[in-house]
Amino acid sequence: MRRFKLALFILILLSLNCQSKQELASNPSEPTDAPDQESWNAHITTSTNGKVASRIKYGHLQKFSKKRIVQFSEGVEIDFYGDNGQHASRVNSDSATLNETNNNVELIGNVVFASDKGLNVSTTKLNWHEQESKVTSSELVRVITAEKDTIFGVGFESGQSLEKWTILKPWGVTQKKLNLKLTESTGDSSDANK
């Protein structure tokens, strides 16, 4: 009788833990948004026509193949290189997301972008458009030039080397004397020909 009770107890336990293959497929034990790959404290090098274009260092990487995105966290640092292979600029942020469809990167949180020639850009969000070698932001930015001029604004566009840049809605402070020539317009089109 004792063996029968033990066998019955084991049989009940086994039947409670058994699931069909169909039940397992429809009710996976892992969440569907889990990353396919993860890595820690590593770097990725990208190249264009055999020349190093950028190096990305990160604390943590999560790759989601179905969504075609890669998320970087725990600190991100990207070094950009010019066509001649020389280091041109560096950007740091708290985190970033790479869209594998177009290789664009969105950098988020405490973004600091600095050129080797002394230009420094700070913002909360910056987008790197890899195919165009261009960076943009629609957020508030602070730019400190090599001459120590500070310019604030909303919206920013530049090449990844930060040599030519634009602030879309600027304001700021300069250490230079500016010769501002103010002109009055009367709205009379005949004045334009004088």
Image (spheres, rainbow, N blue to C red):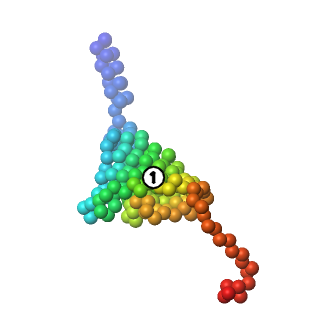
Q: Which residue is pictured at 63% across the width and 68% down the height?
A: 180
Q: Which residue is pictured at 52% across the width and 64% down the height?
A: 166
Query: In the figure, 176 relative to 30: above or below?
Result: below
Which percent across, then down, holds residue 7? 30, 19
The residue closer to the viewer here, 162 or 136, is 162
Q: How many marks?
A: 1
Q: Which residue is pictured at 37% across the width and 29% down the height?
A: 16
- Viewer can see residue 132: yes
Q: Residue 86 occupies which quadrant of the picture?
A: bottom left
Which residue is the site of mark 1? 113
Q: Quadrant of the N terminus?
A: top left
Which percent across, then down, holds residue 153? 58, 57
Residue type at the position of mark 1: Phe
Query: In the figure, 95 relative to 15: above or below?
Result: below
Q: Which residue is pictured at 31% across the width and 11% down the height?
A: 2
Q: For the view shown, which residue lies furthest in the top direction?
A: 2
Which percent across, then down, holds residue 179? 61, 67
**Circle 1 sits in a helix, a strand or a loop, which is it?**
strand
* Label 1 Cα neighbours within 10 Å, binned few <14 / some 14-19 / many ≥20: many
The residue closer to the viewer here, 189 or 176, is 176
- 162 with respect to 22 (left or right): right
Query: In the figure, 187 relative to 67: above or below?
Result: below
